[in-house]
Image: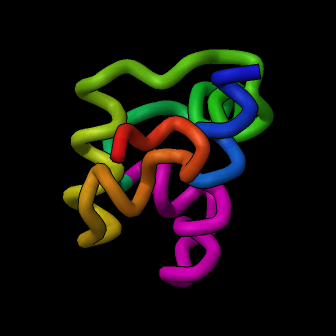
Amino acid sequence: MEAEKWGRRIRAFRKLKGFTQEGFAKKIGVSVSLLGEIERGNRLPSEQFLTEVTNILQISMDELQPPEDRIE
């Protein structure tokens, strides 16, 4: 369940910023299959992966984090 939340957020922001899955995977230095696994919620992204995603998309970790997981 946790992996699905992160995957949906990553996919939504990637599309919002105009990246294809192939282009985004290349930009962050991972395979398309790994990115797909994460976006589908089959794999939980690592901290390093999330940091790279936020850097490329120019968003904060707070923006990327699923709202229900945020600590207020």
Q: Is residue 17 left or right of residue 22?
A: left
Q: Position of residue 44 (x, y in %)?
A: 56, 18
- Looking at the picture, does residue 59 appear above or below residue 26? below
Residue 68 lies, in percent from the top left, at: 60, 43
The overriding secondary structure of the stretch rendered in magenta is helix
Closer to us: 26 or 17? 17
- Name the side, left or right, on which 22 lies relative to 57: right
The residue nearer to you, when weighing 67 against 25, is 67
Q: Residue at x 59, y 26 (%)?
A: 34
Can you tell which quarter of the image residue 40 is in?
top right
Left or right placement of residue 50 versus residue 34 in this view: left
Q: Nearer the viewer, residue 32 or 44?
A: 44
Considering every residue shown, the one lying at the far front of the view is: 72
Residue in the image at 48% along x and 24% along y: 45
- Residue for point 34% across, 31% down: 49
In which quarter of the view is residue 51 placed?
top left
Compared with residue 48, is residue 40 higher up or lower down, i.e. above or below?
A: below
Residue name at image x 34 percent, y 47 percent? 72
In the rendered picture of this protein, how many numbered marks are placed on residues? 0
Residue 61: say if magenta: no
Which of these two is toward me, 24 or 8?
8
Q: Is residue 18 above or below residue 50?
A: below
Quarter holding residue 64: bottom left
Magenta residues span: 10-26
Residue 67 x/y as whole percent: 55, 52
Picture coordinates of residue 37 (x, y %)?
Answer: 70, 26
